Image (cartoon, rainbow, N blue to C red):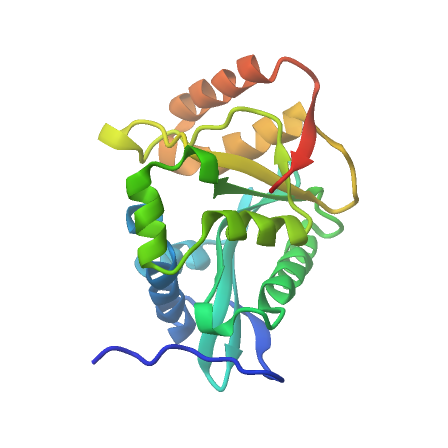
Amino acid sequence: MKPAAPRAGPGSRFSVRQVTDPHDPAVEAFGRLQQQIYFEPELLIPPPVIRALLALPAGERGNFLVVAEEGGVLLGGTFFHYLRLPNTGFSSFMGVAPSARGQGIARRLHQQRFAVLDQAAGGKVEGVFIDVVAPERLSPEALEAERRVGSDPLARRQAFAALGFSRVDLRYEQPVGGPGGGPVTHLDLLYCPHQPTEWVPTERVLETLRAYWRPWLGEQRAEQEVEKLRQRAKGARLRLLPAA
C-alpha cells in the first residue's frame, strides 16, 4: 500500500529536529522523500548509507540529518556534512514534500542546518556548499524526468537563491555518476556564506571538495579532481554570482 502523501496546510505547526539515532524511523522516511521528489534516484544517498554515516564518530567530517515533521509525518529534510579543515558544510540533499511547500519549511531547515554546523565547529562555519542542477544544461530526457516527479529545476534554483545561496563562478563537475560512470556535468556549485560577500577564497572551495570527495573517491582520485578545479579557477578567489 502506498503511503499517504505528507500534508502541511495553512497555519501548519511543523517542528524541526536533528536526527541523532541512526535507527530513527525518520531516516527511512527521508529516503522515501528523496525518491519522491528527485529525478535522478541513482545519485541519492540511500537510508542504509545515511544510517552508517550518522553512526560514525565525529572527526574531520561530521554527518548530520535534520528533518521537519508534523504529527510524526516527515515533511522535509536535509542531509549534510561538517568538514573540519575548511570549516565549511556541504549539503548532500535538501528537499520538501510538494504538498508541504510554501510554509517556510526550507528556510527553517536551512537555519537549523547552520545551527548544527556552528555547534560542530565550536563557533561559526564559513558557509555551506551544495551542488544543484543547472536547468540550461539538462537534456530533454532529464527535463521530462523532472516533470514526472513534479519538479521544476528553475524553481529549485530560485528557492536556493532565496535562502542566500550564490553560484560559484567555476565550471564544476561531480566526478562520477554521469553517462558511463563519467562526470556529472549538469550541476553548478552553490555557496551560502555565513556573512554576506561577493567572493569566496579558491582554497576554501578546493579544501571543501577535497574533504567531501575523499571518502568515496579515495585520496589519489580526490586530489586529481581537485587539481582539475584548481587549473580552471585561475585565481585566489572566485566570484559569487546569482544562483538563478
- Tell me if residue 39 can be seen: no
Residue at 57 percent across and 72 percent down: it is: 17
Left or right: 175 as drawn, with respect to 122:
left
Left or right: 1 as drawn, with respect to 71:
left
- Tell me if residue 99 can be seen: yes
Residue at 58 percent across and 80 percent down: it is: 14
Question: Where does residue 102 sit, x and y in percent of width and height?
Answer: 58, 69
Position of the N terminus, as image quadrant, is bottom left
Residue at 79 percent across and 43 percent down: it is: 196
Position of the C terminus, as image quadrant, is top right
- The total number of labels drawn is 0
**Res. 90 image quadrant:** top right
Question: Where does residue 132 sit, x and y in percent of width and height?
Answer: 49, 43
Q: Is residue 98 above or below residue 178?
A: below
Residue at 59 percent across and 54 percent down: it is: 159
Question: Where does residue 241 sit, x and y in percent of width and height?
Answer: 67, 33
Give 103 or 15, whichever is nearer the viewer. 103
Question: Where does residue 118 sit, x and y in percent of width and height?
Answer: 70, 54
